[in-house]
Image (cartoon, coloured by chain):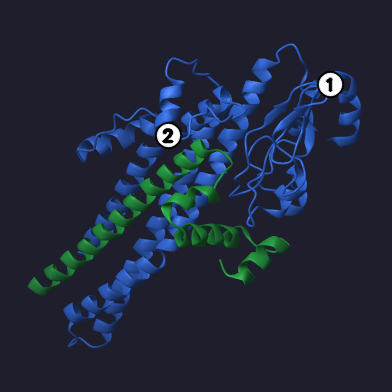
Amino acid sequence: MADIELKVLVKGEASDEEVTDSIIKALQSKKKSSVSKEQFTDDAMISVASDLQGLFAKQYNAMLDDIEKALDQYAEELEGE
Amino acid sequence: MNKELLDKIKKIVDGRYRYIMLGTLGNKGLSEADKKVLTAAGIDYKNKESLISLVYHHNYHTNPADPRAPKNLAAIRRNLKGKKIKNSAILSTLNDSFKELTEKMRKDTETRVVGLVRESLRKIEMEKLADSSINVKELFKESVSTIKQTLRDTSASGTRDWQRVVLTEMSNAIGYGSTEQILDDNVDKAPQEIVVYRVTVNDNITDPTCRKLYGHGGVPPKLYRLSTMLGNGSNYGKKAAEYSAVVGSPHPNSRTSQIIELKPGFAVKTGGSVTYIGLDKWQDYLNKNIIK
């Protein structure tokens, strides 16, 4: 995370969204082995949270892929009109 | 034709969120209507396990989590095999709450995506009204690229929403599961006789309120009577300045620990480990350290 973000968070001036963004950025900037250390105090809970994040990412990306396919298909059908 | 596209997109969003619900709450989180839709779509909905229930039961049976405690999901499942599954009213509300929040996310996503596509289609129709010679096909293709890019650009907000729900609701399950275990272990005591604390994650993004309420960094966790925490209820819907020490999630995105009982005669050290000081010194220790 950028120093400035840390300062905002430590000062307690951050909104919920800013805190979550910082968590996501911290997660994205680290290797999988160290991602877990950013969450909870219990390794088992870190494991469950990681599974839930993986589940969502997989389904959300699949949803975007499906929507893109539907839009492309619609465009193809327009060509035939 | 436009309606068919919008309906198709709605079905895609609904279907993917049903998978998310199924993976999180098992088939107990599904209504009969959900099951019919999944059956029609050829989706297996036999997964019975709710991860929220699993979090609750893990924290009920493993409190405090010592070095021998399960370290991952598979180990939690093995550890819980054959153990009492508590039929708690609180657990039921935790699963219901998670379902409602996921359902709200589904609706928000559907509104955002469908709104984006609908607006593009409307724009093309208006342009066609203004100039009947325009090439609708080309215009739509241009819109599709913009829509795709916008959807990818806004996916961070979906991830952020989900992360908030997961962290907050898991914190609730952790807090309530561990508290119910403490109460069941102390049936002969009133909650005001039970002393508890919780441990915050020792990093820079820990919420300032959690630092203040539960202790953080180089100081021992703060001590409360369980009756005080239970009496404070929930921080849901409150402003940060009004937050108090509670057994559930202290605030959105919380990552705090279980509620941990401090047994008579022990003192808690920085980081949450305990040391025996003796029963004769315990009352003085509580008088000096307990938060009222």
Q: Quadrant of the N terminus of chain A?
A: bottom right
* A62 relative to B194 in the view: left or right: left
Of discs 2 and 1, which sits in the foreground? 1
Residue sitting at x 32%, y 71%: B147
**Where does the image place residue B212, in percent across and percent down from the top left?**
77, 49
Tell me if mark 1 has few (under 14), some (14-19) or many (20+) residues whose alpha carbon lies within 10 angstroms of its own: few
The disc numbered 2 marks a residue on which chain? B
Residue sitting at x 30%, y 69%: B148
Alpha carbons under labels 2 and 1: distance apart = 37 Å
Q: Secondary structure at mark 1?
A: loop
Residue sitting at x 36%, y 27%: B48
Q: Secondary structure at mark 2?
A: helix
**Where does the image place residue B18, in percent across and percent down from the top left?**
34, 42
Task: Using the rendered view, name the quadrant where residue B266 is placed.
Answer: top right
* B124 relative to B196 in the view: left or right: left
State the mark number for residue B73. 2
Q: Which amino acid type is shown beneath numbered disc 1?
A: Gly
Residue B64 vertical position relative to residue B98 in the rendered view, above or below: above
Q: Using the rendered image of the protein, determine whether residue A81 is visible from the camera's viewpoint.
A: no
Q: Which chain is blue?
A: B
Return the residue found at the far top. B188
* B244 relative to B10 in the view: left or right: right
Give the labeled residue for mark 1. Answer: B278
Residue A70 vertical position relative to residue B62 in the rendered view, above or below: below
Task: Using the rendered view, name the quadrant where residue B224 is placed.
Answer: top right
Q: Which amino acid type is shown beneath numbered disc 2?
A: Leu
| Along the viewing direction, whichever of B138 and B251 lies nearer the viewer | B251
Q: Quadrant of the C terminus of chain A?
A: bottom left
Question: In the figure, what tint was chain A given?
Answer: green
